[in-house]
Amino acid sequence: MSIYVGNLSYDATEDNLTQAFAEYGSVKRVQLPTDRETGRMRGFAFVEMGTDAEETAAIEALDGAAWMGRDLKVNKARPREERGSSGGNWSNDNRSSRRY
C-alpha cells in the first residue's frame, strides 16, 4: 500500500519527501506526478514505506503538518478508479438532439 500526500508545494522534490518520510521508517519509493502538457508537478505525491507500521506512523505524524509553507494532507492511497474508454458522454444520441 502507498501513502497519498496532497497539498504539496510545487517546489517539493523526491529528495525532500524522502528525507521527510525517512524520519518514520524506510522509504521504498516516491512518485511525484507531473502534468503531461506543462511538465509541472501536480501538487501531490505517493510515498511507499517499508512496513504498514511505518506508513501509519508517517500518516499520523504528517497529516495536517506544515511543510514547505503548506498544510499537508496525508492518508492511505486509494486504488485508482477505472475510467471509461469512451472519454465522456458522447454518443450518437447526443448528436441527434442538436439543431443545425
Image: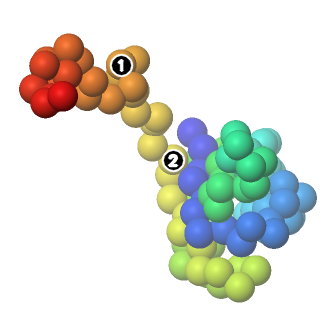
What element does badge 1 sit on?
loop
**Is 15 on the left-hand or right-hand side of 1?**
right
Rendered position, 66 above or below 49: below
Pick the quarter of the image with the C terminus. top left
Looking at the picture, how far across and down is residue 32, in whole percent? Answer: 73, 49
Q: Nearer the viewer, mark 2 or mark 1?
A: 1
- The count of marks equals 2
Quarter of the image where one finds residue 51? top right
In the image, what residue occupies the spot 59% across and 80% down? 71
Q: Residue furthest left?
A: 97
In the image, what residue occupies the spot 75% across and 54% down? 40
N-term mark: 2 or 1:
2
Rendered position, 96 above or below 29: above
Q: Determine which residue is flagged by label 1.
A: 86
Q: Determine which residue is flagged by label 2.
A: 77
* Amino acid type shown at disc 1: Ser
Of residue 93 and residue 68, the one placed in the foreground of this image is: 93
Quarter of the image where one finds residue 86? top left
Label 2: how many Cα within 10 Å (few below 14, some 14–19, many 20+): some
Rendered position, 15 above or below 23: above
Looking at the picture, how far across and down is residue 91, in whole percent? Answer: 23, 18
Pick the quarter of the image with the N terminus. top right
What element does badge 2 sit on?
loop
Quarter of the image where one finds residue 90? top left
* Amino acid type shown at disc 2: Ala
